[in-house]
Amino acid sequence: MLNWIWLGLIWGAVVYAAFTGRMEAVSKAAFDEAIGAVSLVIKLVGPMILFLGLMNVASEGGLLAAIARLLRPLLRRLFPEVPENHPAMGAMVMNLASNVLGLGNAATPFGLKAMVELNRLNRAPGVATDAMVLFLAINATSVTLMAPTGTAAVRAAAGSTAPLAIWVPIVIAHTCANLTAVATVFWLRRRARYAVRPLPDAPAVAETVSETSPPTPPVREAAPMRAPQRVFVWGTLVVLAGGAALELAGRLADASFKDASIAMLNAWLAPLLILGLLLVGVAAHVRVYESMVAGAREGLDVAVRIVPYMVAILAAVGMFRASGLLDVIVGALDPLTSAVGFPAAALPMALLRPLSGSGSFAVMSEILETHGPDSFVGLLASTLQGSTETTFYVLTVYCGAVGVRDVRHALPACLMGDLAGFAAATAACHLFFA
């Protein structure tokens, strides 16, 4: 399905531009987006290398085994085909935890690592397994509980009196999108149309686990913590607690406890995650620097693999937007969406959000400037921006990292999640802001 959608975007853009005189804009968009795709991958390489290295430290320190053991009942129900102590289990846990905390830059490397490990269990190279499909659906609609700081910053710059007013509606929309996507995955899983069909040009010998191949090494258990490590780790935690108390006291002089706490969480989460993963390694006697470098090498290999996929999808989306065909689709859908309380001015957000994160962010900024950040349209556009992830970006990056070409029912499940998220966002905005 991705193949036909990608072709349809380019075909529609070129054909429509041929009759509207926008061929020059389409041509420029193709080159600009191709360049932008490479720039985006370059920006992704740094965090990817950093967090893949940190994940290796945590894995050697036993953290992933501990977390996987804590969440094993839920994960075993969701992913029964993944062995309990498989590295993919720990990577998925860290990916989901990062998403919940709003650490998108950390979640992506963990997600890529999970896809690589899930692919080792794949008996049909190039075709997504059931576990991959479910993992993709969860990531494309992942629930984020933290404040949408990026969107709130744009709202504040546009003059909003309550930049974080969209926080609760976004959590509601995210939850509905996630539950719908997961339910759709299980609903479509057994349909013959989405059965696993080996690709005709797939390699004869797959890099998967079979009866004759050695098992994938399990996630390491934590080693007992000795006295020096115990003093260092607990001493660090005490010092950080003191620093947090001092900063919170300083912030309370100018803000309420809620606002000060939210600001501190947003500022402290990423550094605490980085240091926390290293402390896990220190506690388990891991040589953290060597372990980090060893794990980080995989980041460069993954980045090289995803470049072609990123260029392909972003160039197609850019051409489609530049041709003006998106505006035509918005106009055609206006009567239907207006009848259910969805203003036409917000339609470009809903159509672009699954396709392009940067494109939808730009559209949101334009809507806020045109209609005002605290208007209903402005509040809805801001909520839509945070209600789901960029579906095609998630599928492109994660599947491209492991060479998956047939995503089976992942795309319809993700799109159903997007639709549910948009519906929930609209309902929540009517409830809170009507």
Image (cartoon, rainbow, N blue to C red):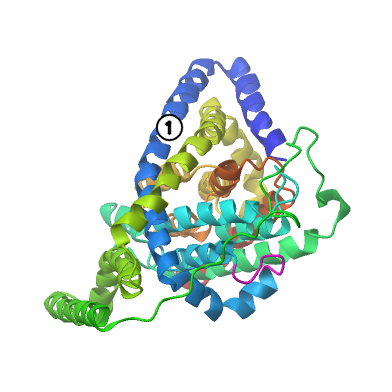
Left/right placement of residue 405 relative to residue 262 reads right
**Which of the pair 124/283 is nearer the observer?**
283
Up-down: is 89 above or below 120?
Answer: below
Query: Which residue is painted at 48% across and 77% down in the image?
Result: 66
Disc 1 designates what residue?
Answer: 38
**Which of the pair 402/341 is nearer the observer?**
402
The residues colored magenta run 79-85
Q: Please name the amino acid that badge 1 sits on.
A: Val
Query: Which residue is painted at 42% across and 66% down in the image?
Result: 60
User: Is residue 246 visible in the rendered structure shown here?
Assistant: yes
Q: In x, y percent, where is residue 106?
A: 40, 57
Q: In x, y percent, where is residue 45?
A: 39, 43
| Quadrant that contains the N terminus | top right
Q: In x, y percent, where is residue 21?
A: 55, 15
Up-down: is 229 above or below 406?
Answer: below
Within the magenta stretch, is there residue 423?
no
Within the magenta stretch, is there residue 81?
yes
Mark 1 burial class by Cα count in 10 Å: few <14, some 14-19, many 20+: some
Up-down: is 287 above or below 38?
Answer: below
Q: In x, y percent, where is residue 244?
A: 19, 77
Secondary structure of the residue carrying tag 1 is helix
Query: Which residue is painted at 46% across and 22% down in the image?
Result: 31
- Is most of the magenta stretch helix, strand or loop? loop
